[in-house]
Image: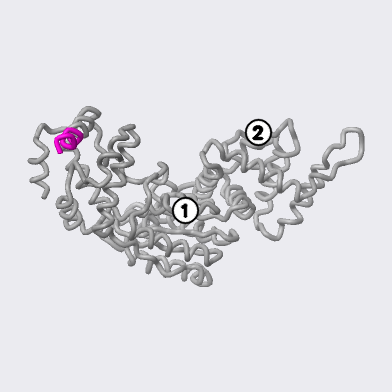
């Protein structure tokens, strides 16, 4: 018993020495990889989401969850589970203007296992497309050169009925064929395909009209990329209620503090116009074959507004909108598992291997009663659970109070 008490004191000393709170950086984002697995109730919810995704072609699947419910954690769970899908995250809090360009950039970054690996799948894709257009057929002669004009013509014939914007399509075909078949311009063509912004002189050298800042070019390349990848694609759109609350305010949070007609007359405000355009662009994504779209919403009320807006614009698309899935709160068992798994990961990351060896069945430095209290006070909201744990561990790590006194305050 004395030996175990010494190990407890050592663990406390380590926490105080490194002055790190194990739960301090827990809030999930779409940019930072989330390593933790799912708690039991979320595993069942994930299976329900996957069932809808795998059982449909084009689809919009709404996920309902209040603030802090763990919707972004769901994205990472999907990404780690669905290895045969290219799963991409965007938030309408950040990706708002230049929607197609920013969405394309996110897809490019997610082509590889790591962002720096994304260029190889892109190179493979352009090679495969050029081969399909006849790149392996060569002109007769000493150098056996490729007939690039013939390949571009074949590509245009194959794709002209799939794309309305012919100028943007021609830019895409030119960039793809140049990237594969013109060694002197390959690097610049690859820059264009990766979404880099280019000067007029650089575009002219490649015989291109626009880079991907042009709306039509970005959409055409996004469609080409998604429809020709070996993997299927999921676009996970977080904070979808942002554009709904701008177009049709339905809560106090979105209430306008002045009448925009004071500045803009009877016309819509710039924000509302921008929100309408973004909504239209998201609906246009449904013309990309096989794309699955998941949207997150804070409440069911927003879902009703979305259905109304879609019906106004194109009621035929309503068939692609699935019934929303309501994300459940944590159970008491979930809170226990979250706490234990996170501590396991934290101590493994700081290379304190004795934790998993000596504390595998222990909840130290807190106890079961405190975790039950946290569950009761937070009603299972994951973010609120984390806030409570951060507060307790801040006291454990920073304060000079005895551990038993800290625990008494929170029981």
Whether residues under marks 1 and 2 lie with C-beta atoms below 8 angstroms apart, the answer is no
x then y, percent, for residue 247: 38, 60
Q: Dividing the picture into quarters, in which one does residue 197 lie?
A: top right
Q: Residue at x 81, y 44 (%)?
A: 136
Going by the image, does 103 lie left or right of 28?
A: right
Gap in Å between the C-alphas at discs 1 and 2?
Answer: 36 Å
Q: Secondary structure at mark 1?
A: helix
Is label 1 or label 2 in front?
1
| Residue 315 against residue 212 in the figure, above or below | below
- Give the label on residue 188, or none: 2
User: Which is more toward the observer, 410 or 5?
Assistant: 5
Magenta residues, start to end = 1-8
Please tell me how crowded label 2 is: few (under 14), some (14-19), or many (20+) other residues with Cα within 10 Å: some
x then y, percent, for residue 103: 51, 48
| Residue 144 against residue 254 in the figure, above or below | above
**Is 32 within the magenta?**
no
Q: Dividing the picture into quarters, in which one does residue 390 lie?
A: top left
Say which label, 1 or 2, has the lower sequence index. 1
- Give the label on residue 81, or none: 1
User: Which is more toward the observer, 350 or 238?
Assistant: 350
| Residue 206 against residue 330 in the figure, above or below | above
């Amino acid at each position: 018993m004395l030996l175990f008490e010494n190990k407890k004191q050592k663990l406390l000393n380590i926490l105080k020495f490194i002055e790190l709170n194990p739960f301090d950086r827990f809030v999930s984002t779409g940019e930072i990889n989330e390593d933790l697995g799912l708690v039991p109730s979320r595993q069942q919810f994930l299976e329900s989401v996957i069932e809808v995704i795998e059982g449909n072609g084009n689809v919009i699947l709404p996920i309902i969850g209040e603030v802090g419910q763990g919707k972004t954690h769901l994205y990472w769970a999907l990404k780690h589970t669905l290895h045969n899908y290219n799963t991409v995250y965007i938030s309408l809090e950040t990706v708002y203007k230049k929607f197609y360009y920013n969405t394309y950039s996110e897809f490019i970054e997610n082509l590889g296992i790591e962002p720096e690996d994304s260029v190889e799948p892109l190179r493979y894709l352009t090679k495969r497309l050029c081969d399909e257009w006849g790149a392996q057929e060569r002109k007769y002669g000493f150098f056996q050169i490729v007939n690039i004009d013939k390949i571009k013509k074949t590509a245009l014939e194959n794709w002209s009925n799939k794309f309305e914007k012919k100028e943007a399509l021609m830019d895409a075909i030119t960039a793809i064929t140049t990237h594969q078949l013109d060694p002197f311009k390959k690097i610049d063509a690859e820059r264009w395909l990766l979404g880099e912004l280019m000067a007029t002189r650089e575009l002219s050298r490649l015989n291109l009209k626009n880079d991907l800042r042009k709306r039509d070019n970005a959409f055409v390349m996004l469609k080409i990329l998604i429809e020709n990848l070996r993997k299927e694609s999921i676009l996970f759109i977080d904070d979808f209620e942002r554009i709904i609350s701008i177009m049709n305010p339905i809560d106090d949070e979105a209430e306008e503090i002045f009448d925009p007609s004071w500045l803009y007359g009877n016309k819509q405000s710039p924000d509302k116009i921008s929100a309408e355009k973004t909504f239209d662009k998201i609906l246009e994504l449904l013309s990309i074959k096989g794309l699955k779209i998941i949207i997150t919403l804070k409440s069911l009320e927003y879902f009703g507004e979305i259905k109304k807006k879609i019906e106004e614009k194109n009621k035929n698309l309503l068939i692609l909108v699935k019934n929303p899935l309501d994300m459940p709160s944590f159970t008491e068992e979930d809170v226990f598992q979250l706490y234990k798994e996170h501590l396991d990961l934290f101590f493994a990351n700081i290379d304190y291997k004795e934790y998993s060896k000596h504390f595998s069945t222990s909840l130290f430095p807190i106890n079961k009663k405190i975790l039950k209290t946290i569950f009761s006070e937070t009603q299972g909201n994951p973010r609120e659970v984390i806030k409570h744990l951060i507060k307790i561990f801040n006291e454990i790590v920073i304060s000079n109070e005895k551990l038993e006194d800290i625990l008494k305050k929170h029981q």
